[in-house]
Image: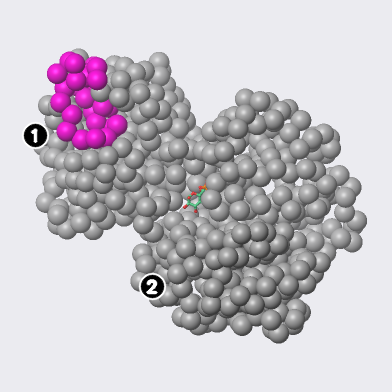
Amino acid sequence: MCGIVGYIGKRSVAPILLEGLSKLEYRGYDSAGIAVYNGSEIQVEKAKGRLAVLSEKTNGGQSVNGTVGIGHTRWATHGEPSDVNAHPHLSQSGRFAVVHNGIIENYIALKKRLESKGFEFISETDTEVIAHLFEYYYKGDIMEAVTKVINRVEGSYALGVLCVDYPDQFIAVRKASPLIVGIGEDENFIASDVTAILKYTRNIYYLEDDEIVVLKRDGVEIYNMDLEEVQKEVFTVNWDVSAAEKGGYEHFMMKEIEEQPKALRDTISPRINNGKVVLDDISLTTQDIKNIRKIYIVACGSAYHVGVVGKYVIEKMCRIPVEVQVASEFRYCDPIVGSKDLVIVISQSGETADTLAGLKEAKNHGARILSIVNVVGSAIANASDDVIYTWAGPEIAVATTKAYSTQLAVMYLIALYMADKLGMVTSGEYARYVKDIEALPDMVAKILENKDELQYLASKFYNCKSIFFIGRNLDYAVSLEGSLKLKEISYIHSEAYAAGELKHGTISLIEEGTLVIALATGSELFDKTVSNVKEVKARGAVVMGVTTENQDDMDTVADYVVKVPQINETLLPSLTVIPLQLFGYYVASLKGCDIDKPRNLAKSVTVE
Ligand code: G6P
């Protein structure tokens, strides 16, 4: 939920840290800070608020001199957003500076102990404990101090540590919180993710838990907890720098919405060969698939909504029971999951704390884990038996769009792949399905040509106090996502309801002028949803229908109708979600909201 950058080299470090942090600001944006060794001491500059405040305070970094330093952008967990709670945190004497992502679970006990030894705490953070612990354990050998600190702290952490006594190096450590090392020429980096350092290098080390890194100008040493040196392979990132830049767009969200056809193509094409779905990435055999008793889908947020689509699709196509659970519930519900079950874990970042914990819970029960992940080498990818990567590229806007769409595409591929192995589809159906999946990128591109229509509709409704989404089955699954998209970036209250459930209470909220967005695409349930549209209209609602080109009946009941091309009905969520993303975006834009960085949210939720 926070972002870390560190640098050692020959250039002035502060501007590099600020620039790196600007690429990570989506991870947390309530305060920021940097610590730089300035030749005699560690200089710390921090500021509450957006990174721009820190940048202004330090004159774009020009007022801080030095060539080694660490930086942090924060999403508050322990203690309110403030200058004092912002990272880096200094140890009592100022010998150590620490930046930290994650949570130190035993920090209260450690704090008490350190206080009894005379340490004074100035912040409310758990992180300050680490800075003081370093000082407490430091007897002249920093590596000895690192191992002692790590042995004492419980929880998750990615750390960057600067020490006055070691002006030509800094230390990084990772446990259950993302951290990568960037290798340059006579300069080296750490970062929470590659976007922060792409401008300088694409050569990366992905760190494992409990690895300790010593970064110097001319090299990087990586050690395990026993301080034995570890050899790692260099990974070359193939994203280009522009992937993480706005490239002329006002917001990353719109850029990412528009990138969906490409992201879908990149995700789908390598997995379809000669009309066959090829999932080389996974090792599930036909027998494994036949042996599956039940499938669980575990995820958070929009990834969970992909799971809701997945349930309908897999159950329909494979006739295997599927249970979708929000990860924060799954991890604590003592799930009845075991070795005969497949658990599909979905995560863009691959680092969502609850999703990772759910994965571990399932694994402990002996279940097999198949994950759908966007970030290569992330914790969830590493902990899974099989991974299918979505090739969406870096997603920066907090509200996901292209990651959601590519996760859906992977879900279809998995469903079709399994249905085929189970003998549940005829060759004709299979061929049509493959053709339709391949057509998705172009269809999405076509819908995106109609952006003006959604902008117009947004202009009519951006003053609404409350907006409801209704639909049945797959349309309900997409309603959930449409409603989340709208509320998270526009701050308009919104709820998604299974259309038939509305009248069991929530319909009492419908009054004259309330906007109801009704998704009705499935042919079998179309008429049912149309009846629900009539019910809400009879109570004063204004209805925006979302349906397919061949469904004219919607025009007679709804006030406004948005149409998407006709395609295999199972795949329609990939199309109907696009106008909803656009609607949310334009509403938020008209309201003047901070679209890429909505209040209180963070892109990667690495804490419970
Ligand atoms: C946050 C993001 C959402 C995302 C969810 C799960 O809430 O704002 O966009 O869907 O986390 O994240 P993941 O990285 O696991 O997909």
Q: Amino acid at mark 1?
A: Ser
482 in magenta: no
Residue 591: image tag: 2
Q: Residue at x 84, y 61 (%)?
A: 431
Choose the circle earlier in sequence order: 1 or 2: 1
With 321 as the anchor, is 422 left or right in this view?
Answer: right
The part of the image, by quadrant, that contains residue 225 is top left
Task: Look at the image and give the residue range highlighted in magenta.
Answer: 112-138
The image quadrant of residue 297 is top right
- The CA span between labels 1 and 2 is 49 Å
Which residue has dot 1 on it? 40
Furthest residue toward left: 40
Image coordinates for residue 444, horizontal then vertical, percent: 63, 70
Q: Residue 124 magenta-drawn?
A: yes
Q: Where residue 405 sits in the image (x, y, percent)?
A: 60, 59
Q: Amino acid at mark 2?
A: Lys
Which residue is painted at 76% across and 50% down in the image? Answer: 314
Horizontal and vertical percent for residue 427?
90, 57
